[in-house]
Image (cartoon, rainbow, N blue to C red):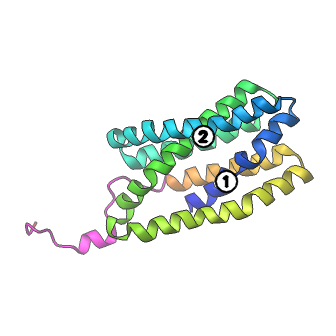
Amino acid sequence: LAVGLLSVAFFTPFVFLASYAQDQGIGAATASIIVGLIGVTSTLGRLVLAGAGGRLGEVRTYQVCHGLMALAFLVWLFAGGSVVALLTYSILMGMGYGGFVSLAPAVLASEFGPERLGGLIGTLYSAFAFGSASSPPLIGWLTDSVGAAAGVAVALTASIGAFAATMALRAGAPSPDDAAIPSPTGG
């Protein structure tokens, strides 16, 4: 559920952020830098937040990543033509995105067990197909029909929903299958 909702928000900046920035009076080169910064900080997020996950717990850090992405869309909603605000959006989005990508397999293994990880990762990536197919046309239609704020508000709502869904995860919660497996030591 979280990834399906996130996918609606996730593709929004890659399709609309540069044109949004230009519509706000920001030059094309600066708009490209704003979008490109998502990729740069995504790499940084993969390194920093994956490491933090090992120390703070993968599930908790994964939740933080979803929170960063939701916060990013809130910043974008009120950014207007502020280059600083849009750069802040890109940094938050990239860090959250990078951490999400690097931590998702560990969270899936923690929550559902490593023996089903292959199928679960396939399901996770398939959920992104929903967003890649639906988000650009939906956000584009809203932007054209109502204005950019409506499209960003939908992305914000979807990312908040994704964040809320991750809050249902509990680190260390045993899967139902774990209870049925006897301990090798008999305990």
Which residue does the numbered mark 1 point to in the structure image?
A: 158
Q: Amino acid at mark 2?
A: Gly
Q: Quadrant of residue 108?
A: bottom left
Separation of residues labelled 1 and 2 (CA atoms) = 21 Å
Q: Nearer the viewer, mark 1 or mark 2?
A: 2
In this view, the residue in front, 160 or 135, is 135
Closer to the chain start, of discs 1 and 2, is 2
In this view, the residue in front, 150 or 117, is 117
The residue at the point 51 percent across, 68 percent down is 123
Q: Is residue 25 left or right of residue 183?
A: right
Predominant SS along the magenta part: loop
Q: Are marks 1 and 2 in contact (CB under 8 Å)?
A: no
Up the image or down, 112 lies above or below 49; here it is: below
Which element carries disc 2, helix, strand or loop?
helix
Which element carries disc 1, helix, strand or loop?
helix
**x and y, in percent, of residue 102 in the image:** 45, 48
The residue at the point 47 percent across, 56 percent down is 168
| Quarter that holds the C terminus | bottom left
Which stretch is magenta?
167-186
Question: In the image, is residue 155 part of the stretch drawn in magenta?
Answer: no
Q: Is residue 8 left or right of residue 68?
A: right
Up the image or down, 141 lies above or below 43; here it is: below
Question: In the image, is residue 179 part of the stretch drawn in magenta?
Answer: yes
> Can residue 79 be seen by looking at this rendering?
no
Which residue does the numbered mark 2 point to in the structure image?
A: 39
**x and y, in percent, of residue 136 in the image:** 76, 56
Category of crowding for the residue at label 2, using alpha-carbon neighbours closer than 10 angstroms: few (below 14), some (14–19), many (at least 20): some
The residue at the point 51 percent across, 54 percent down is 166
In this view, the residue in front, 154 or 187, is 154
Up the image or down, 65 lies above or below 116; here it is: above
Residue at the far left in the pictured view: 185
| Quarter that holds the N terminus | bottom right
